[in-house]
Image: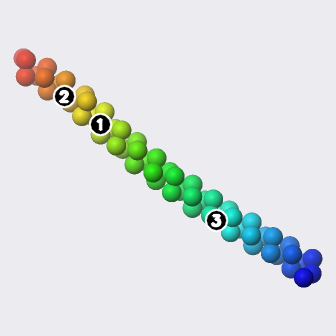
Amino acid sequence: MSLQDAANLGTTLAAVATGVLVWFGLKQLSALKKQVEAGQQSSDAAVSAPEAAHLAVR
């Protein structure tokens, strides 16, 4: 294996590793977005129940 071949292999491996890290990061962002949306829904429900009770008392 020549020095040029080794350099090309190293560049290819670095590109593959970068692609894997980007894919993993996007997957993590998607999971975080789902958690935030679920938290927002539960927060909305928690606010809605006291508001409904307050309106029912009026």
Determine the image quadrant of residue 43. top left
Q: Determine contact: label 2, label 3, CB under 8 Å.
A: no
The residue wearing badge 3 is 19
Residue 20 left/right relative to 4 = left
Task: Tell me the number on the disc at residue 32.
Answer: none
Q: Earlier in the sequence, mark 2 or mark 1?
A: 1
Q: Earlier in the sequence, mark 3 or mark 1?
A: 3
Which label sits on residue 42?
1
Circle 2 SS class: helix
Residue 5 is left or right of residue 47, and the answer is right
Amino acid found under the numbered disc labelled 3: Gly
Q: Quadrant of the C terminus?
A: top left
Q: Residue at x 93, y 76 (%)?
A: 3
| Residue 45 drawn above or below residue 34 | above
Which amino acid lies under the numbered mark 1 shown in the image of this protein? Ser
Using the numbered discs, state the Cα–Cα distance from disc 2 to disc 1 in whole angstroms: 11 Å
Asked if residue 16 is positioned above or below residue 45 in the image, the reply reads below
Judged from this view, the residue extending furthest toward the right is 3
**In the image, which disc is placed on residue 49?**
2
Residue 22 position within the rendered picture, expressed as x and y whole percent measured from the top left: 60, 59
Task: Give the crowd class for mark 2: few <14, some 14-19, many >=20 residues within 10 Å.
Answer: few
Mark 3: few, some, or many residues within 10 Å (few <14, many ≥20)?
few
In the image, is 55 to the left or to the right of 22?
A: left
Residue at image point 29% right, 40% down: 41
Task: Give the image quarter of residue 6.
Answer: bottom right
Q: Position of residue 19 (x, y in %)?
A: 64, 65
Q: Are marks 2 and 1 in contact (CB under 8 Å)?
A: no
Residue type highlighted by circle 2: Ala
The mark that comes first in sequence, 2 or 3, is 3
In this view, 57 is above or below 3? above
Residue 23, position in %: x, y? Answer: 57, 61
